[in-house]
Image (tube, rainbow, N blue to C red):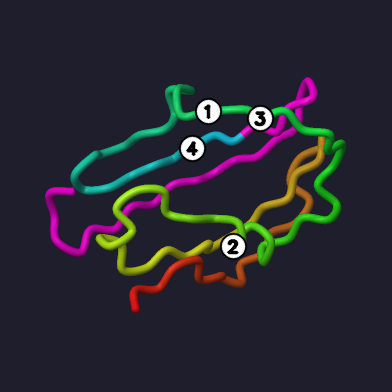
Amino acid sequence: MATKNETITYTMGMSLSGGKLWFEVTNGHSKSWGDFGDQGYLKTGVDSALSHFDHCSPATSAKFSRIGYAKNRVKKMVLKQVRYYSTDGLVKTDTQGKTVHLEE
């Protein structure tokens, strides 16, 4: 991060396919890094027995989100929006932000 108090924005997608829970970063942007995450290389999958996301919520996502590196350099991390999709497209959007991390 080359800019003091820099803001990084990105979309984290989750999907279920082939017995795996997939996570992918898309639509990323920051002043230092520019645009990132739409090339498909920020994607990983883990084995999962889940067949749906019916019990997931923004609160659950916020609870299990974390800063994996250099937490001491992050002032604030916020889950700003959750979009729910079905095979037919967008179902609903939750815009009630959830704070994941706030510098103490």
The residue indicated by pointer 3 is 46
Dot 4 lies on which element?
strand
Q: Which mark sits nearer the N-terminus, 3 or 4?
A: 4
Dot 3 lies on which element?
strand
Q: Which mark sits nearer the N-terminus, 1 or 2?
A: 1
Q: Is residue 48 above or below residue 67?
A: above
- The amino acid marked with disc number 4 is Val
Query: Residue at point 58% right, 60% down?
Result: 81
Q: In the drawing, what numbered circle is on residue 54?
A: none
The quarter holding residue 88 reads top right
- The amino acid marked with disc number 2 is Ala
The residue indicated by pointer 1 is 43
Q: Is residue 47 left or right of residue 99?
A: right
Query: Residue at point 44% right, 29% down?
Result: 38
The residue indicated by pointer 2 is 62
Q: CA distance from mark 1 to mark 2?
A: 19 Å
- The amino acid marked with disc number 3 is Val
**Is 9 within the magenta?**
yes
- The amino acid marked with disc number 1 is Lys
Q: Nearer the viewer, residue 26 or 21?
A: 21
Q: Which mark sits nearer the N-terminus, 3 or 2?
A: 3
Q: Which mark sits nearer the N-terminus, 2 or 4?
A: 4
Badge 4: residue crowd in 10 Å (few <14, some 14–19, many ≥20): some
